[in-house]
Amino acid sequence: MLLVIDVGNTNIVLGVYEGTELVDHWRISTDRLRTTDEYGVLIRELFYLNEVNAESIDSIIISSVVPPVMPTLERMCQRYFGLSPLIIGPGVKTGMDIKYDNPREVGADRIVNAVAAYDKYGGPVIIVDFGTATTFCAVDGKGVYLGGSICPGIGISTEALVQRTAKLPRIEVRRTDGVICRNTVESMQAGVFYGFVGQVEGIVTRMRKELGQTAKVVATGGYAVIIAPETAAIDVVEPMLTLEGLRIIYERNS
């Protein structure tokens, strides 16, 4: 079985594949201070509680946008699974031509998402990832990664609003019935929610115009299920897009 690990700024998402089937998946917090043993014990315990046989793991692939965590995770893979992981980076076959000024600058998660979206839906395709940052990526009809846009994410935008103002409270990000609200909490919720809906619609419209044709829009990330129902700009939500991309890339390198 294949263990796939996606290391984000806020969370680490893990999944176990048997062939092309996702057997199980988990989400844990990204902690730069966590040790090799702490990660190893936590992951093995998740396997045990969900009746996944850790001894059946025969390969591991990792994508990461948090370089300081990588040495710890590499040692964890070697100590607790006896395996050296394949790490997304230069030299790894993705099957995708990257038309970026400096391809090394592109976040591993963005490439992995693009590979998965193009593999499933073809091109042109636009990928919106609602992570710590909200990213928009474009892939053309020939499977070439063209680049995209990076925006502050919903979580950090909301947190900045609270931290930089004296009286505004922390809020739950949720849909409101309208934007003319009569209390502070709902006013903030409306501003955050519909502000990001408008951001998605605006950037997707401009991307489609630059692509010169209609493109399918695939959303992923934690807030995708909240934003997607409110806008026609998003065609489909794929919560496990990154894990699927890791599986595809591993197969292309095995």
Image (cartoon, helix red, strand yellow):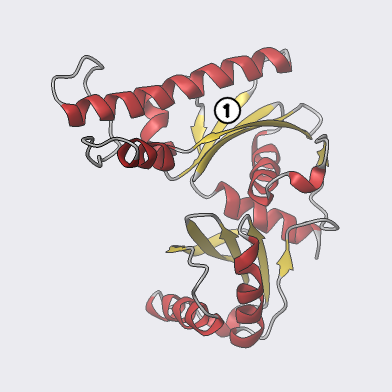
Residue 42 to residue 203: above or below = below
Residue 157 sits in which quadrant? Answer: top left
Mark 1, Cα crowd under 10 Å, few <14 / some 14-19 / many 20+, is: many
Quadrant location, the C terminus: bottom right
Which is nearer the eye, 92 or 158?
158
Q: Position of residue 34 (x, y in %)?
A: 49, 75
Residue at (50, 19) in percent of width and height = 201
Q: Is residue 80 left or right of 82 when viewed as pictured?
A: left
Residue at (82, 56) in percent of width and height = 90
Which is nearer the eye, 77 or 125?
77
Quadrant location, the N terminus: bottom right
Residue at far left of view: 182
Q: Which residue is mark 1?
A: 217
Residue 92 to residue 37: above or below = above
Q: Position of residue 21 (x, y in %)?
A: 57, 60
Residue at (48, 81) in percent of width and height = 38
Residue 204 sits in which quadrant? Answer: top right
> Which amino acid type is marked by label 1?
Val
Residue 83 sits in which quadrant? Answer: bottom right
Q: Is residue 131 visible?
A: no
Q: Is residue 145 visible?
A: yes
Q: Position of residue 5 (x, y in %)?
A: 59, 63
